[in-house]
């Protein structure tokens, strides 16, 4: 991640309107273990897109991960993976650093959570 993006990401974590805008685009599902789908803009690769400034976009689940676990935890993760294999999912119980650098779309993946729990699809 580029230094300017990291700086904007850190700054955006402290802006209540930015955090609320992210949360408004996540559909909260009451069922235990369910995905929480992103309802905002979607990239051509199927990931949510979220604007943290007038000229800076981040992948939505990366913003959510930084919000839940901190920007430093996001930076420590080379690749984030969805144990649910749903690229629009924002449920942080489903997302974590990939245990393998190669996580093909739709593959069964195992992720290591910053809280030391391991989640598998």
Image (cartoon, rainbow, N blue to C red):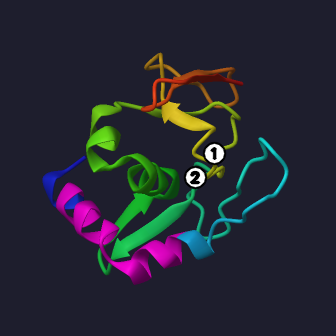
- In the shown orientation, is residue 102 left or right of residue 47? left
Badge 1 marks a residue whose secondary structure is: loop
**SS majority, magenta:** helix
What span is in magenta?
6-22
**Residue at numbered disc 2:** 47
Residue 65 pos. (x, y %)? 45, 48
Residue 19 falls inside the magenta stretch:
yes
Q: Is residue 70 above or below residue 12?
A: above
Residue 109 falls inside the magenta stretch:
no
Q: Is residue 42 above or below residue 118?
A: below
Q: Which circle's residue, 2 or 1, is located before the other in the chain? A: 2
Which quadrant of the view contains residue 109?
A: top right
Disc 2: CA contacts within 10 A as few (<14), some (14-19) or many (>=20): some
Residue 5 pos. (x, y %)? 23, 59
Q: Residue at x 58, y 55 (%)?
A: 44
- In the shown orientation, is residue 60 left or right of residue 46? left
Disc 1: CA contacts within 10 A as few (<14), some (14-19) or many (>=20): many
Q: Residue at x 44, y 72 (%)?
A: 19
Q: Is residue 96 above or below residue 101?
A: below
Q: Residue at x 26, y 43 (%)?
A: 72
Badge 2 marks a residue whose secondary structure is: loop
Residue lying at the far right of the rendered structure:
31
**Residue at numbered disc 1:** 87
Q: Which mark is residue 99?
A: none
Q: Are dots 2 and 1 in contact, CB under 8 Å?
A: yes
Please identify the quadrant where the C terminus is shown: top right
Separation of disc 2 and disc 1 at Cα? 5 Å
């Amino acid at each position: 991640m580029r230094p300017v993006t990291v700086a904007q990401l850190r700054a955006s974590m402290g802006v209540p309107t930015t955090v609320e805008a992210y949360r408004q685009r996540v559909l909260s599902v009451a069922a235990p273990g369910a995905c929480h789908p992103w309802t905002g803009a979607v990239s051509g690769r199927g990931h949510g897109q979220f604007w943290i400034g007038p000229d800076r976009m981040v992948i939505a689940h990366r913003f959510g991960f930084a919000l839940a676990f901190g920007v430093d935890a996001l930076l420590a993760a080379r690749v984030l993976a969805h144990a649910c294999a749903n690229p629009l999912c924002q449920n942080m119980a489903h997302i974590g650093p990939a245990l393998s650098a190669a996580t093909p779309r739709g593959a069964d993946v195992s992720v290591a959570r910053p809280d030391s729990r391991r989640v598998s699809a």
